[in-house]
Amino acid sequence: MGSTDFDSSAPDPYLDPTTGILRNLVGATTSKELAAAKADLVAVRVVQLRDSARIEPSRDLQEFRTIDLTRPNNEPFCPVNLIERAAASISRELTEDNHLQGLERREFEEKLSYYYDSFNYIHPFREGNGRTQREFWNRVAEDAGWFIDWGKVHGEQLNEASQIAREEQNYQPLIVMFSDCISPLST
């Protein structure tokens, strides 16, 4: 979601100095090749995620980040040395919350907002966190009997709601955003 910043006086460790594109695990050397690989891998992973009983992050394109990142307003994401511990902790909490299954709509929206913010703070990748989260939450929502229409979510609204949640622990803007884009799955 949105862009991330880091110390611009230092070289970007995620860019290949030869190609100028993000280092990647697929051998892409041009932006066009990387975009094609992303599209293919995302399509495959979305199908796998929807068919899988387990939800886990994919490292097809890149490894977890190795440097600290901040939002454009200099608010930090999870420190790199805490990513795995933070992810394990919030994943355990989500599991204890039965992956949001069996909740009435309002409670689902509230808990989804809390967990969305918590997972967003972790921000494990240099690129692709928003796409990864959308697919993850699509699966959680579907398993809980809900549909999230991300087409109704506007980037600026999401960024602002996420910032308020992170800075003030006020999830109301996220709750409002999700209430506008969540509907029960048809049976």
Image (cartoon, rainbow, N blue to C red):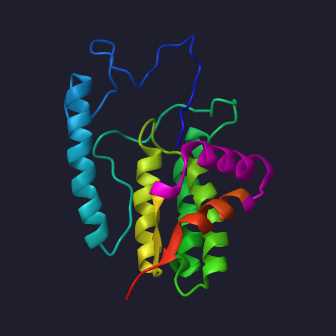
**Total marks drawn?**
0
52 in the magenta segment: no
Q: Residue at x 55, y 48 (%)?
A: 154
44 is higher (above) or lower (below) than 183 = above
Closest to the observer: 125 or 112?
112
Q: Quadrant of residue 109?
A: bottom right
Outermost residue toward the right in this view? 168
90 to the left or right of 56? right
Query: x and y percent of residue 98 in the render?
Result: 53, 81
Query: x and y percent of residue 184 in the render?
Result: 48, 80
Task: Report the predominant secondary structure element of the magenta stretch.
Answer: helix
Residue 171 seen from this side: no
Q: Residue at x 53, y 31 (%)?
A: 67
- Residues rendered magenta in the picture: 151-172
Q: Residue at x 33, y 16 (%)?
A: 20
42 to the left or right of 113? left
Query: x and y percent of residue 57 in the render?
Result: 39, 56
Q: Quadrant of the C terminus?
A: bottom left
59 to the left or right of 164? left
Query: x and y percent of residue 99 in the render?
Result: 51, 76
Residue 156 seen from this side: yes
Q: Residue at x 48, y 34 (%)?
A: 66
181 is higher (above) or lower (below) than 38 = below
166 in the magenta segment: yes
106 is higher (above) or lower (below) than 129 = below
Q: Quadrant of residue 112?
A: bottom right
158 is higher (above) or lower (below) than 115 = above
